[in-house]
Image: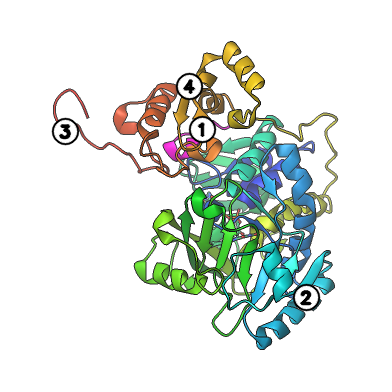
Amino acid sequence: MYDVIIIGAGVVGCSTAYWLSQYEMSIAILETHNDVANGTTKANSGCMHAGYDPQPGSLMAKYNVEGSLMAKELCEKLDVPYNNDGSLVLAYNQQDVQTLQELYQRGIQNGVKELYILDEKETRKLEPLLSEKVVGSLYAKTSAIIDPWRYTIALVEVAVENGVDLKLSNEVKAITKENDVFTVTTSKGQYKCRYIINAAGVYSDIVHEMIGEKEFTIIPVRGQYFLLDKSEGEKVHLTLFQCPSKYGKGVAVCPTVHGNMIVGPDAETIQFEDLATTSEVLNYIKERSALTMDCINFKENIRNFAGVRARSDRQDFIIEESKSVKNFYNLAGMASPGLTAACAIGYHVIDWLNTKEKFVKKENYQETRKKVHFKDLSFEEKNEMIAKNPAYGRIICRCEQVTEGEILDCFNSPIPPQSIDGIKRRTNAGMGRCQGGFCGEKVAMILKEKLNIEFNEILLDKEGSNILMNKAKEGDY
Ligand SMILES: Cc1cc2nc3c(=O)[nH]c(=O)nc-3n(C[C@H](O)[C@H](O)[C@H](O)COP(=O)(O)OP(=O)(O)OC[C@H]3O[C@@H](n4cnc5c(N)ncnc54)[C@H](O)[C@@H]3O)c2cc1C
């Protein structure tokens, strides 16, 4: 029997596992998919928001600001990229300038440091290629960007090193409780525990209602994006938001930690977790982005994607013990700024558990993680690595300069990849301009060999995403 079961291996569940794994307790994470960070955590803007946006006094405001303050040190410990580029909210007229003042005051009330209202000249000095329509901005110096996948994988890798059982491909189907012990039935088996942390993202209301009464509803809100090549990434230096207006929050133009540009998202209420992109919305995003920068070359688009926000009917995060089920905690309604807030939310879960019984800190636990980033090494360091292991001398992904050695390394990590995209999320292979056009086959062959599977078992990503279905003729696929 486990002390704690966490349902959902997105950034919220994995952050919770990271912090709880420092305590003397047995923990399992149950996740539907064959990898972590494969829900909403997979598709967002990657912005660690400063915290001027949420309403003062809300849970969003509290955990956003705390998370933003914690993230830099945590990313350093986890050896994942973190760029403190700052962000601008852009004003296009005098009414917007008024709104910037309101956001500024909200930020001050929320405890955000280093916020500045800039005039047009000061704004253009920070971001020279802005459209002529921009008349001023709110500059948040503490805003940053991260890679949400790497961050989440790193959090859970450390948790697993500290003894957490990560059970992938285990969709929770039913939950019962008898004598203070929960029985959680998944697609793979049954697990018992004394506490449940529900971090099931878009499905967190459904998971809660497997045992509890209806206490909240999750409304899925989809957002679509353009991902542009690094040639466009050079045009943008800060995360650029548009001033919220009667037309909504506008679309953002953002750099990524890997040097690309992303443009989006919109906000569309949908019925279920549907990750399709549509030409109608993408055209809207393209049009709206011109307010921010009218020099974006959308011919450099290398991928489109969508993510689904888990917005709650309370318009705030839901971070509380279930009212109808004792020892069942909901970490739900994690719409934006959930990525930013996740590390702070996970950090505080122990406070709630410790009101029930005293869990003590382990004498020894791991907090950090280190990876090889071959392309960032000096010439001498590269030669040294290749002399020790010739696989570092073979480039598999030309666009992102990822070596065979780095891909093989991830199979020796605490959570080996199960798919081509699993390798991409760990190493960047396939993330570049050709989107795996050149390296995809080589990556697939390494995956096949390392997992010892047949050709028709090679997955692009989730279960069922097999890249080869049947033999075209006898003998080969
Ligand atoms: C378009 C968009 C842009 C965003 N931009 C930002 C941003 O810039 N900054 C920011 O701070 N936040 C942003 N967010 C919000 C952020 O992405 C989310 O708050 C965060 O990823 C939520 O993480 P999570 O762990 O709660 O959910 P998820 O990542 O969805 O994880 C939940 C997990 O639970 C699993 N699960 C569900 N049901 C079950 C079950 N029955 N059994 C087992 N497992 C189950 C799912 O498979 C999933 O892996 C954005 C979101 C979107 C959609």
Report the residue marked by disc 4. Answer: 394
Q: Which mark is residue 49?
A: none
Which one is earlier in the sequence, the residue at label 4 or at label 2? 2
Q: Residues within 10 Å of mark 2 (few under 14, many from 20)?
A: many
Residue kind at label 1, given as amino acid type? Gln
> Which residue does the image show at 70% across and 63% down from the upper left?
126
In the displayed structure, would residue 185 be above or below residue 64? above
Q: Is residue 51 left or right of residue 444?
A: right
- Helix, strand or loop under label 3: loop
Report the residue marked by disc 1. Answer: 401
- Helix, strand or loop under label 2: helix
Q: Residues within 10 Å of mark 4 (few under 14, many from 20)?
A: some
* Percent coordinates x, y for residue 152 in the rendering: 62, 44
Question: What whole-number distance in Å separates the C-alpha atoms at marks 4 and 2?
Answer: 50 Å
Viewport quadrant of the C terminus: top left
Which one is earlier in the sequence, the residue at label 4 or at label 1? 4
- Helix, strand or loop under label 4: loop
Residue kind at label 4, given as amino acid type? Arg
Residue kind at label 3, given as amino acid type? Ala
Viewport quadrant of the N terminus: top right
Q: Are marks 3 and 1 in contact (CB under 8 Å)?
A: no
Point out the frontmost of discs 4 and 3.
4
Give 254 or 171, whichever is nearer the viewer.
254
Q: Are marks 2 and 3 in contact (CB under 8 Å)?
A: no
Span of residues in magenta:
415-423
Quarter holding residue 249: bottom right
Q: Is residue 422 left or right of residue 454?
A: right
Report the residue marked by disc 2. Answer: 104
Report the residue marked by disc 3. Answer: 472
Residue kind at label 2, given as amino acid type? Tyr
Which one is earlier in the sequence, the residue at label 2 or at label 3? 2
